[in-house]
Amino acid sequence: MDKQITSMDFEIVAMENFHVCGLSVRLSSSQNNNFTIIRNHWQRFNNELRSRRIAGRKNWKKFSITYQKDDGYFYMAAIPETPTQTGFEKLHISKGHFAQFQHTGSMELIKATIYNIYKEIIPNSDIIIDKERKVLHYEYYDHRFRWNSSNSIIDIFVPIESNQ
């Protein structure tokens, strides 16, 4: 069994504006259902990248953004926006301060990492989440990501109030 090695350490980082493009899906109120929704959504998104001949580029970067819109929560699988990508939704991530966490382990354990961030780490720290944020958090995937590997690394960014 893969063991969760999620670091409880975090750092506060200042991020500049950036834009992504990708596909979004509405989330449910069930974390178990959301895991299935998200897994299927990534398969759809990666198939779309392959059909557009975008997949497999060197030094690849992908994002997942959990955000609030109107009366619901959405999940976007995305890549950095470039002028050549068309037909994807676009999302702007505003500059600001973020608490950066790191998930180490398989994807099946990320639900526990997110839970620990919001229910254990943040409440027991001096972090003040930005209450005006539309983006709840985003995950950053690069060459360190390996789907089911215990050595896989994903960076998780939570928007915080800028006076921290």
Image: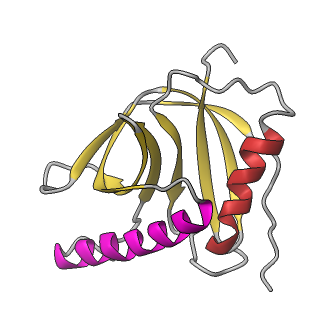
Residue at image coords 31%, 69%: 45
User: Could you tell whether 133 is left or right of 60 in the image?
Assistant: right
**Residue 162 x/y as whole percent:** 60, 17
Q: Residue furthest bottom?
A: 1
Residue at image coords 61%, 60%: 31
Q: Does residue 48 lie above or below 100 as drawn?
A: below
Residue 57 seen from this side: no
The residues colored magenta run 31-52
Q: Quadrant of the C terminus?
A: top right
Residue 37: say if magenta: yes
Question: Which colour scheme appears in the figure?
Answer: secondary structure
Residue 68: say if magenta: no
**Residue 84 x/y as whole percent:** 13, 55
Residue at image coords 12%, 55%: 86
Residue at image coords 45%, 49%: 65
Residue 1 seen from this side: yes
Q: Main secondary structure of the magenta part?
A: helix
Q: Residue furthest top?
A: 163
Q: Quadrant of the N terminus?
A: bottom right
Q: Nearer the viewer, residue 24 or 80?
A: 24
**Residue 26 x/y as whole percent:** 38, 54
Q: Nearer the viewer, residue 147 or 123?
A: 123
Q: Residue furthest right?
A: 124
User: Could you tell whether 32 is left or right of 42 in the image?
Assistant: right
User: Could you tell whether 123 is left or right of 91 in the image?
Assistant: right
User: Could you tell whether 40 is left or right of 105 in the image?
Assistant: left
Q: Does residue 107 lie above or below 124 as drawn?
A: below
